[in-house]
Each structure stands twice: as structure tokens, then as C-alpha cells.
Amino acid sequence: MSRPALGGISFSIAAGELVSLVGPSGCGKSTLLRLIAGLDVPDSGELFVGNEKIVEPHAERGLVFQDPNLFPWLTVRRNIEAGLVARGVLHEKRSEVPEFMRLVGLEAFANSYPHHLSGGMSQRVALARALINHPKVLLLDEPLGALDAFTRMRMQDEVLRLWENRRTTMLLVTHDIDEAIYMSDRILIMTPAPGRIDREIDFDLARPRDRTSDSFLRFRTEILEHLHFAGKAADISA
Amino acid sequence: MNADAAVTDKRSRLPWPMQLAVPVASLVTFGTHLLIAQKASPLETHSYMLLFWEIIGVSIVLAIAQRFWPALRKWMRHMWPIFTAAILSLGVWDVVTVGFHLLPLPYFPGPAAVLRSLISDRALLLDSTWHSLALLVSGYTIGVIVGLVTGVCIGWSNPVRYWGMPLLKVVGPIPATAWIPLAMVVSPSAIVSSAGLIALAVWFPVTMLTASGISNTRASYLDVARTLGAGRLYLIFRVAIPAAVPNIFIGLFMGLGASFLTLVVAESVGVKSGLGWYVSWAQGWAEYGKVFAALIIMAAFFSTVMTLLFELRDRVLVWQKGTIKW
């Protein structure tokens, strides 16, 4: 018997927003992201970017995965150029490559191969690779999940810096509630079986946000309660 | 600082025993040969003696040169034990064959006789080597090109895989040498059919491994490429094929081994030139010195070709960490 992964999801994101999609494992966050990217097709319903229906992947909807998935046979520079080559615009847009390498702080590694890079560095290359296509929306599927706690916090600032610099619309999927509160304008809370968006929370906190401030903790408590993780032990059957 | 100086000091000197190893081994081996020559005559000594004088001369020159040249010193440190063992093994070969007749004459001549055959028949050997090289290169190249094309098609396209795999599974495992009788009848020229057989022997492993490499391309690479705006050509030529290159090289190596085998057999049976032909021709005249000379050349020839393929692989797969050393 097959269960629907997602059931009746409807939401919209405004241009330039940084929205987080938070929820436990298996609630369908990654499935939803793949649908928006165009890698999968929904059984029913439609997705739009502006007025255009999403039917297939396109560089205007960039996707950064949890595993950076850098092409191991290409250097850092050529990995970043990959989108330009794929779209046949390398010749015109090649001059932007140094700018994006500088943006993620990896000019010194331009000619290194991915196996020389650490996890954080690889993710930065993956970000540059997606951003050089000037996407209308950047989808991030738990991009910092594989990093250690300290690198993760530094990378959160990195991503925020990139966002503030370019104001690309970003949809960030994460299971880390602190990350979502630290970074987003808005949080969509998803619950599983079937995946649906339960709640939307807006933030009006100024950035950079203080992870130890009262308002931060207040939001945190609110979300944890909503997901039944506050106070006593979690109810696993939920 | 003192420890550093001690380390560089040790490394800057090749120990005396090592410097003397090759000349001493040469003297020992040649001495053995002379001893044996007394017992069994007539025995070739002239060119064998020249060989050893040359080895001794070169090793003395290198022993002096390495004082001034660290790179040479490093190479000598690495290779000298192997060279010494190789020279001593010539002595063992001499003792086993000519000295104590442990291996029956005339089938197993001593090293001096082989050296004499090598030198006296060098024109024909060179000609044979050249013919073998030409046949190998043409057969291998055709096999690789066809193999890569069929491999990519079978790996990428489902319909092609549906029809191609059964063909591959039935025709591929048949050794190319089994087709020799048919090939000799069907084809106008032995050289064309031999090249075709070599190509067939190479085609199977190259196709199998290319197809496997392509169809096992990580889906995440393809997903990433699609979100970067890639079309089908980019996905095939800039993602699937580069990702499959490590597998492709495995196929190339397997194909190379199969091609050596098919080359020698095809030459022995049909073609009137080449090292394989030379071996059966020399055997026909019971000139076993020449047989061994050809075997030695074959070893050097094939080994060099393998090395070239490994060098190519190291260059192409520079992005991979941890590759097998040849």
C-alpha cells in the first residue's frame, strides 16, 4: 500500500524572502524541494515561479544538496563554471567566475580538486556553482546537515551574507530549528504522513540574530511545542 | 638541527655495499659463466663478456655521478637491489640450464646463447617487433573506439541496452582466438583478420565496463547538472562519461591483456610476421635461443605498452585520490 508523501500543500514565497521549511525526518521536505526544482513531477497540483508552471529543472531554480555533489573530475573553478558550460554561455559570462570565487572565499583553491576540500569548503563551492546562474530562487536541501556544529554556524553566516548580498529568494529545508530561527524571514512547519504545512511563523527580528536572546528562545519554544518536542519526551507515533 | 643534519647526511650517501653491489654481482655471474664454460663447450662467451663489462662500466660511472646528483641517488637507492638480483638471476639461469642440466637442453638454452641469438638475429627481431606493434595498435585502437561507442550507447539508452546486452553476453565471452579458423577462411588477408580478432577481443571488456560505468553514474550528479540547466548532450558527455572514466580504464586494461594474447596466437597461426610468428618459426628450426630472445623482447614490449597506459591513466585521473601503482 503506498502512502502519499505529500498531501495538499499550498504556500507562496515572495521575491527576496528567506523562508525555512522545518520538520522531522520523513515529512516530505526534500520531496517538496525536488518538486519545486522540477526533478520530480507531482501527481496532482501545480507549481509556479511567477506565472510559469514548473515542469522540468531549470537553472533559474538552483538546488544545493546536503552532499555538495561537486563533480570530482573538475577543479573548483570548473565546477563553478559548470552551469555556464551547461547553458552554453561560458564565453560571455566567464568573467563572473572570479567574482563568485571571491564571494565564497575560495580564490586560492581555484585549481584544486574536490577531494582536497573540507566539507564546508565544498558546500561553499556548491553555493557558488548554483548562484553563478543568477537563479530566481535558490533551494537548499539541508545544506549544512553534514557539517560539524562550529562549521555549521559559520556557514549559516556565510549563507546569510550571500543572501544579503544578492537578495536571491531562498527556500531552506532544515531539521535544525535553531538554524531556521537564526536565518529566516518566515518558517513553514511541516508534519508528516502525509506531509503538510501545519503552521507559518513570521519573524521580525533584526539580523544578525542573537542565538541566546529571549525572543530567539521564545520562538524556539513555540516551534518545539508545536512539534511536540517540548517538555516531556517526544511522542514517537505522532 | 643536529638531528636534521644527521638525517640528510645519511641520505646523502649511498652505502658502499650498495654502490658495489651491481659490479660485484656482475663479476660473480660472469665468473660462474666462465666456470661453466670450462665444463661444457663450445660455449659463447664473447658478447656475454662484453655485456658484463658494459654493466660494470656503467655502474661505476653512476656510482661516481650519484655523489653530485640527488635525484640519481634516490633512483639508485630504489633500483639497485632489483638490478643486483636480476644480474644474479642470470647466473642462476646459467647454472640451472648449462651447468647442471636441470632443464633439458636444447629447449632451455643458457643466457649467453640467448644473448647471441638476440644480437645475431636483431634485424629480423626488430622487423617482427615492428609488425607486432603495428598489428597491436591497429587492432586495439579499433576495438577501443567501437567498444566506447557501444558501451556509451548501451549504458545510456534503455532500448539499446535491451537489445545490446544479450548480444554482449552471448558473443562477448567467446575468446577471440576461437574464431581464428573462421577468420582465416573468410578474410582476404591474414593481417586484416588478425586485426579484426584483436579488435573483437578488446571490444568486449571495454564495452562491458564502459556500459557499467555509464549506467552507474550517480543520480545526484545528473540531478545537479539538470538543476544547472544541462541538456542531454551535457549529461552524457560532461557528466556520465567523465564519471565513468575510472571504469573505462579498467576496461582498457582488460582489453590490453586480451589483445596481447590474441596477437601472439593470431600471429603464430596465420600471419607471416610479428613476434608470435617468430617464436613458432624459430621453434620449427629448433633454435630455442631465438625463441627465448623473442620472449624477452615480448616481455619488454608488452610491459612498456602497459606502462604507457598506466601513465595515461595517471594523467587523466589526476582528480582521483588513491590509484593503483604500476
Image (cartoon, coloured by chain):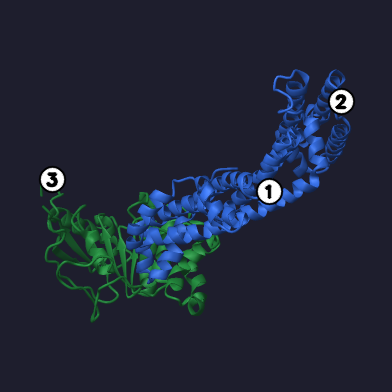
Decide: is B274 above or below A51. Answer: above
**Three-letter code for the amino acid on which mark 1 is drawn:** Gly
Q: Report helix, strand or loop for mark 1.
A: loop
Q: Callout 2: few (<14), some (14-19), or many (20+) C-alpha neighbours within 10 Å?
A: few
Marked residue nearer the N-terminal end (1 or 2): 2
Q: Do dots 1 and 2 share one subunit?
A: yes
Q: Give the chain letter for green.
A: A
Cα separation, mark 1 vs mark 2, equals 31 Å
Chain letter for the blue colouring in the rendering: B
Q: Amino acid at mark 3?
A: Ile
In the image, residue B260 lies at what x, y percent? Answer: 59, 46
Image-quadrant location for residue B195: bottom right
- Residue A236: mark in rendering: 3
Question: Which residue: 17% across, 60% down?
Answer: A190
Q: Taking the image as drawn, is residue B250 in sight?
A: yes
Q: Position of residue B210 (x, y in %)?
A: 45, 55
Which mark lies nearer to you, 2 or 3?
Answer: 2
